[in-house]
Image (tube, rainbow, N blue to C red):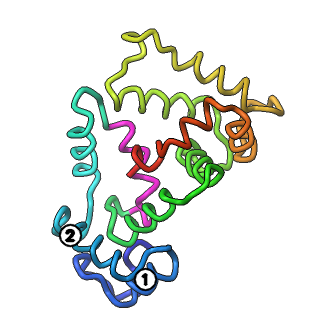
């Protein structure tokens, strides 16, 4: 879908009336806000497309002591709806709209989707470990340097969240377990998703 609401759309720099109406109808953003966002997006991405290399570079500047590649690869894939290797303005706004939703429960659902990299509706231990290591590396924390043990952290999280002990965490288990754990819900509630993923 991203940017190609009508089949004839080829110039990603142009925000068509059709795409503007689509975004107004599918987000909580006003026409004026969308036009301002589009102007800023085009200033940053003159072609009208954000590629993965530029996305990674942006995060490398934000986290100069970290390694942004693993993290950005996982997040970029979630935003690239049409899987063309680039994020256009429509995809960007849809992602921004989803990530800026109010309510801890909504934020937890979004976090679950970020962890569920194979999109099978469950988080397994490998997926959990991959994202934890990617976040550690993003902020420049190495597992060895700070005695952070990703496998132990994963085991602890699964002990708390995997209520049916099947080795997988469903969205319901993730949301309910996080809501019931003040430490986990506090991390999510402090706008971690918006500031980290966008």
In magenta segment, residue 80: yes
Q: Residue 13, position in %: x, y?
A: 22, 77
Provide the secondary structure element on which disc 2 rests.
helix
Q: Nearer the viewer, residue 46 or 177?
A: 177
- Which badge, 1 or 2, comes first in the chain's sequence? 1
Task: Please report the residue visible at 33 percent of the width from the left and 70 percent of the height from the top.
Answer: 89
Provide the secondary structure element on which disc 1 rests.
loop
Magenta stretch secondary structure, dominant: helix
Mark 1 or mark 2: which is in front? Answer: 2
Quadrant including the N terminus: bottom left
The residue range painted magenta reads 69-83
Q: Nearer the viewer, residue 156 or 195?
A: 195
**To which residue does mark 2 refer?**
42
User: Residue 79 lies in what quarter of the image?
Assistant: bottom left
**To which residue does mark 1 refer?**
5
Q: Residue 42, position in %: x, y?
A: 20, 70
Task: Please report the residue visible at 35 percent of the width from the left and 76 percent of the height from the top.
Answer: 34
């Amino acid at each position: 879908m991203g940017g190609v609401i009508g089949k004839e759309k080829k110039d990603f720099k142009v925000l068509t009336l059709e795409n503007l109406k689509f975004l107004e109808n599918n987000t909580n953003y006003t026409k004026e806000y969308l036009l301002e966002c589009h102007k800023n997006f085009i200033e940053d991405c003159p072609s009208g497309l954000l590629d993965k290399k530029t996305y990674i570079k942006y995060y490398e500047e934000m986290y100069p002591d970290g390694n942004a590649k693993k993290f950005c690869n996982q997040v970029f894939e979630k935003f690239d709806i049409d899987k063309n290797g680039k994020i256009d303005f429509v995809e960007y706004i849809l992602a921004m709209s989803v990530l800026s939703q109010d309510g801890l429960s909504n934020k937890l659902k979004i976090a679950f989707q970020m962890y569920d990299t194979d999109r099978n509706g469950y988080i397994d231990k490998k997926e959990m470990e991959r994202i934890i290591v990617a976040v550690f590396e993003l902020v420049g924390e190495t597992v060895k340097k700070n005695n952070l043990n990703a496998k132990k952290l994963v085991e602890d999280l699964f002990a708390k969240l995997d209520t049916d002990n099947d080795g997988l965490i469903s969205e319901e288990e993730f949301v309910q377990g996080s809501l019931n754990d003040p430490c986990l819900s506090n991390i999510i509630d402090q706008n971690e998703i918006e500031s980290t993923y966008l």
